[in-house]
Amino acid sequence: MPELPEVETVRRGLAPALEGRRIARATVRRGDLRRPFPNAFAHRLEGRLVRRVKRRAKYLLADLDGGETLIMHLGMSGRFTVHRATETKKPGRFVHKPADDGSGTGKHDHVILETDEGTRIVYTDHRRFGLMLLADTATLEEHPLFAEIGPEPLDRSFTPALLSAALKGKRTPIKSALLDQRVVAGLGNIYVCEALFRAGISPKRMASSVAGARADKLVPAIKQVLRQAVAAGGSSISDYAHADGELGDYQYKLFVYDREGEPCRKTDCSGKVRRLVQSGRSSFFCSTCQR
Ligand SMILES: [Zn+2]
């Protein structure tokens, strides 16, 4: 499942194709993804100017000039392919080969947007856990999808004090607490494992004890791992690819994730990476240097 860096990478692929462009034509080829598409969805998109393409947590948000925002979520297997007027970008190499190539004609190509400059943006999703909705831009923060979501980890407002306050009294392991989108937005299994490793904090540690010096280490570690992953174009361990079909290569920089039994990569540590199942998800960590 795409995490914040992957969604941000897709946003960066979509923004130049959509921002400042009008949606000349929208084609919606089925009634639903994870949820039904909005009523008269294509009609409400057509003719609209896309002001900005933003991201909140793992959602892509396209603000339209009519006062609505197109909310998009990739689910498990959703992808965008951007076909420019002058070039058709190959969908590229995928970890799990997609059922369709994003040409717009495949049976899993569900939504096609054509801009006034002739760019075609195809949304493909063979498992259909994705989501597209329209909501009022002015009240978006109060929308049920966003009302409870915690701070953006890359925002300056996400500080050790803010994280400590969110973790106060939480008697769950820090690993589970960080996956809770109400505590912090957009983090998933890979980056939580990596941030805890960088901060030297065990995934088993009780969340409420991550305060003071530990929070002072964890917050920069979260920001660092996310920034590096965004710069690398995201990870492509799971069923994920960029909007332009290129794979992210961040998985080559992962220190613990999916490295069970391999040596710890901290230079002064002789430990091995261990795997532990927490809330049904694998945690990878070094029990020697993560406490
Ligand atoms: Zn270690």
Image (spheres, rainbow, N blue to C red):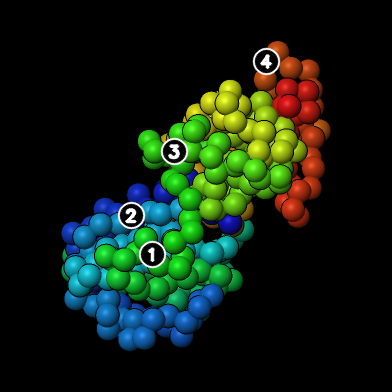
Decide which of tag 2 and tag 1 comes sooner along the chain. Answer: 2
Decide which of tag 4 and tag 3 comes sooner along the chain. Answer: 3
Name the residue beneath numbered marker 1. Answer: 142
Camera-near label (4 vs 2) is 2
Could you say where residue 69 lies in the image, as x and y percent from the top left?
30, 67
Give the residue type that dot 1 points to: Glu
Q: Quadrant of residue 46?
A: bottom left
Q: Quadrant of residue 141?
A: bottom left
Q: Indicate left or right for 59 with 254 as reference.
A: left
- Whole-Å distance between the Cαs marked 3 and 2? 18 Å
Could you say where residue 285 lies in the image, as x and y percent from the top left?
73, 34
Name the residue beneath numbered marker 3. Answer: 158
- Whole-Å distance between the Cαs marked 4 and 3? 29 Å
Q: Indicate left or right for 28 with 36 as reference.
A: left
Vertical relation: 110 (above or below) 271: below
Question: Dot 3, crowdedness within 10 Å: few (<14), some or many (≥20)?
Answer: some
Residue 267's disc is 4
Q: Nearer the viewer, residue 168 or 129?
A: 168
Residue 54's disc is 2
Q: Indicate left or right for 192 with 231 as reference.
A: right
From the Cβ of disc 3, is ligand 1 less than 8 Å away?
no
The answer to whether mark 4 and mark 1 are in CB contact below 8 A is no
- Answer yes or no: is residue 255 visible: no
Query: Which residue is at a point 30% across and 57% down the rendered structure image?
Result: 53
Vertical relation: 71 (above or below) 167: below
Residue sitting at the far front: 169
From the Cβ of disc 1, is ligand 1 less than 8 Å away?
no
- Whole-Å distance between the Cαs marked 4 and 1? 46 Å
Decide which of tag 3 and tag 2 comes sooner along the chain. Answer: 2
Q: Nearer the viewer, residue 107 or 206?
A: 206
